[in-house]
Image: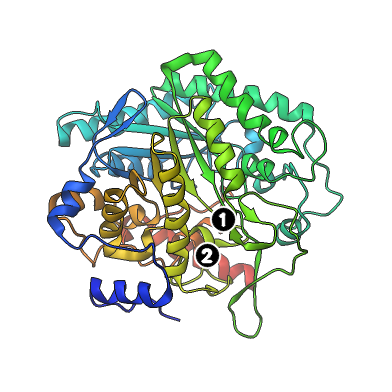
Amino acid sequence: MKHFTYQNLHELQSDAERLGASRVRFEEDAQRVRSILARPVQVGGLRVGNSIAIHPMEGCDGSLDGAPGELTWRRYERYGSSGAKLLWFEATAVRADGRANTRQLWIHAGTVGDLGRMLERTRQLHREIYGAADDLLEVLQLTHSGRHSAPRKVVPSHNPYVDAKTGVPADYPLISDDELERLEDDYVEAARLAHAAGFRAVDIKTTHGYLMIELLGAKRREGRYGGPLENRLRLLRNVIGKIRAALGDRLLLCVRLGCFDGLPYYKDPETGVGVPCRYEAPYPYGFGVDPADPLREDLTEVKQVIRCLESWGVKLLNVSSGSPYFNPHVGRPFEKPDEGNYEPPEHPLLGVDRHFRIAGELQQEFPDLPMVGTGYSWLQKYCVNAGAKNIDEGRIRFFGVGRGSLAHPDFAREALERGELDERKVCKTLTFCTFLMRQKNHPMGQFPCGCPPFDKEGYGQIMKQAVAAKRAEKK
C-alpha cells in the first residue's frame, strides 16, 4: 500500500492530525528552517557547528580484516562534504566475533591506520568546503553484535519470542559472566585505538537488538549481568568507567540507546501485513516496554539509565528504538518492505510519531544532555521541516538522518542553503538498502549496502548482481 501520496506540506500535516500523530509537526517557513538547523550545539567542551547529524549507516563494504574499503571511503568523503556537523561513523566491531557480517568494520591494530586516514580525509574535505573542521564532531560507534554476530551467535539472554524469530534454540549456551567481563577490556582497547586514530568521540552502541541493549532487557538472566537493572547495566557502566579511567576527558563518550524494544513481528500469510507475536502478560522481557502492553513504551527504566549515563560522564545521546531483525517498522518507518518482509502494520506516520514522542519526552526531561532524533527519513523532503520544528520546541537538539543520507548525502548543505530539499533526490524508504544488507551470496560473504535508485553510479551494478545471486539461490 502506498502511504506517501502528499502533494504539499499542508496535506501531510492534515493527515498526521487525522491519524493522531500529534508529535509530528512542521516548521513551514524556509528561512526559519535554515536558521534553526544552523544553530550550533554545545556537546561537552565542543561547540558543534550546526544541528544536523548523519546517523551511523553501515555500508557492509569493508575488507575481510575489518578495514574500510573503497565504497566506505567514498561514503565518508560524501559525508565530509555534506554540511552536517555531527557525523556518526558506522558500527565498528570491538573484536572479531562481534561482527554482524564478514565486511563490517572492525578496529584493531591492523586497521586503525586506515580508519585514521579515512577520518582525516573526511575532515580535509569538510575543511576545504567550509573553511574549518574544528566544529565538526565525528563519533565512532563501537559494537558487539551479540546474537546477530556472524558466523557464531553470541547470546547474552534468552527471550523465547526473540529466540523464535532469530533462530536461537532455547538451550543455546549464553555468554558467561567471565566472558562479558573480558569483553569490557575489548571495548576499552577499541576506544584507545579510536583515540589514536584521531576520533574525538566514541559511541557505546546500545540499540537494535545487539549485545549491549539485549543485556539491558535481560530481566531473567542469572548472575552479575542480569536480573535487577543494576546488574543489567553492569557491562555498560564498567565499559564507560574503564574508558574514562584509561583516557580521561581526551575522548568524548556517547551512547546510541534503544529506548523501546517492542515485540517480534511476523508476516500474515493472507494479508502480508506484520502481526505481533503472541506473548504472555505481564511481559517479562525487553527494555523500555510496558509489561502490561508491550506494544507501547514505558520509559521508567529508560530514564533511570539516562540519569546514570549523565552521572558517568556521557555527553551525547542518540535516541533510537526497535530492531531491524524482528520489528523493522518500529525503528525505520518504511513505505515498502524489503523482499519477503511484512507490510507495515501501522501507518508510517504513527511510527514517526512514536520516535518523536519518545525522543521529545526524554530531551525535555534531560535538557542538559543533547540528544539526536531518529525517524525522519519517511517524511521525505519534509524531514527538514519536522527536524526544525522539534529543535525549535526543545524536543530534540540534533536532527538526524540515516537512510536519507545514503540517497542524498548533500541534504544538509541543501537544507542550510535553501531551507528545503529537492524532492527528486530524497529517500523514498523503499528499502533497497536493506535488501542489499540481507544478501550474503557474495564472494566476500556480504553485498555492499547503499541506495541503488539514487546512487546508480555506486550501487546500480551491485544491485543487479545481488538480484541475480538471489534468483540463483532460489533455483
The picture places residue 76, in percent across and down from the top left corner, at 34, 40
Foreground of the two, 8 or 55? 8
Q: Residue at position x 75%, y 29% from top? A: 179
Q: In this figure, which residue is indicated by the disc labeled 2?
A: 329
Residue farthest toward the front in the current orientation of the protein: 365
**Quarter of image, res 199:** top left
Q: Is residue 101 in view?
A: no
Up-down relation of residue 456 to residue 79 (above or below):
below
Image quarter of the N terminus: bottom left
Up-down relation of residue 187 to residue 228 (above or below):
above
Secondary structure state at the residue bearing disc 2: helix
Q: Residue at position x 59%, y 69% from top? A: 472
Looking at the picture, which amino acid does disc 1 mark?
Answer: Gly
CA gap between label 1 and label 2 equals 8 Å
Looking at the picture, which amino acid does disc 2 mark?
Answer: His
The picture places residue 377, in percent across and down from the top left corner, at 37, 60
Image quarter of the C terminus: bottom right
How packed mark 1 is, by other alpha carbons closer than 10 Å (few <14, some 14-19, many 20 or more), is many
Q: Residue at position x 39%, y 56% from top? A: 403
The picture places residue 194, in percent across and down from the top left corner, at 46, 24
Dot label at residue 322: 1
User: With 306 as the anchor, is 21 left or right in this view?
Assistant: left
